[in-house]
Structures are given as structure tokens and as C-alpha cells.
Amino acid sequence: FCDKCGSRFVRKRPNKPGSNDPFLVCQRFLKYGKDDCPSQKIPEKILIEKTAETIGKKALKQGKLREKIDSIRVPEQFHLVYILKDGRRVNVYWKHKSRSESWTKEMRKNASEKAIDNRKENYYGICGSD
């Protein structure tokens, strides 16, 4: 649940081509925008990772989420509060991984080559070619 407005978070996929990593977003934010609710998106990978850390990978793999977790609150950006069935509240903080950490050597090489080509095009476009 979103602690900013009380709405539930829903799972969405990005509309942007080439990006299909699902995320969770507040329903009110989705419907009315950030002026109505200033909450942020939570990448599904992060939620799964933090949930496994909180209840254990074994419980997560066995599908025991509903047995272990009563609810998950989102009080602010990069902060989750797991309310467990045994009454405990577990505060978990996360951050986005840097893009540089997610790039493979091939991706870096391709980006470098593209940047060099763009610089050449810009240079020759300005100076003209002989």
C-alpha cells in the first residue's frame, strides 16, 4: 500500500519499446499523476529481491508469501515496510542499480562505437566533406 495516499500498488509493464522489466506503481499515481500522489515506481526485481531477503528465499520459492506477509507499505521513495503475520515490522531500503553496473562488455563497445560515429557525423556535417 502507498502510505502517501492509501492506494494499492499494481504491476505494470513499460510502454517503451525494448524495455519490458515490470514494475509496481501506485494506482492513484497511475490514474491521476504525480500531482495527486508523489509515490515512485518500484522495479519488480527489487521487490522480489527484498522480499526474499525479508522472508527467506526458501519461503519465497515455496509460494508462502501470504502465510508470512500481511502487507507491504511504501512510506517514501526507496523504502518498504513489510508487516509480517507474526506482528513484526521490517524496514527495508533499496536503491536503483547504476546503469553502468548493468551493461555488458558488448553493450559498452556498441555504445562507444555509436558515440564515435555520431561525433564523426556531427563534425563532417558542420565542416563539410571534401
Image (cartoon, rainbow, N blue to C red):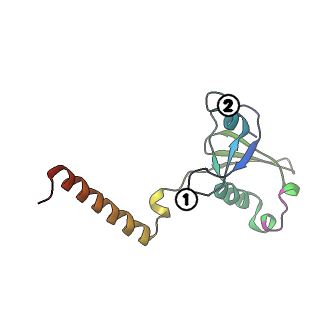
In the picture, measured across the screen, residue 122 lies left or right of residue 4, that is left
Name the element at disc 2.
helix
Tell me if label 2 and label 1 are in contact, CB under 8 Å. no
State the image coordinates of residue 51 (x, y, percent, origin top left). 73, 57
Q: Is residue 32 above or below residue 59?
A: above
State the image coordinates of residue 101 (x, y, percent, origin top left). 48, 62
Q: Which mark is residue 18?
A: 1
Mark before the other along the chain sequence, 2 or 1: 1
Query: Closer to the camera, 122 or 40?
Result: 122
The type of residue carrying mark 2 is Tyr
At horizontal 70% and vertical 58% (from top left) the residue drawn is: 48
Per the rendered image, the range of residues in magenta is 61-65
State the image coordinates of residue 91 (x, y, percent, origin top left). 70, 47
Q: Main secondary structure of the magenta part?
A: loop
Q: Residue furthest bottom?
A: 106
Query: Closer to the camera, 19 or 4?
Result: 19
Name the element at disc 1.
loop
In the picture, measured across the screen, residue 85 lies left or right of residue 10, that is right
Q: Which mark is residue 27?
A: none
Q: Is residue 100 magenta?
A: no
| Residue position marked by numbered label 2 in the rendering | 32
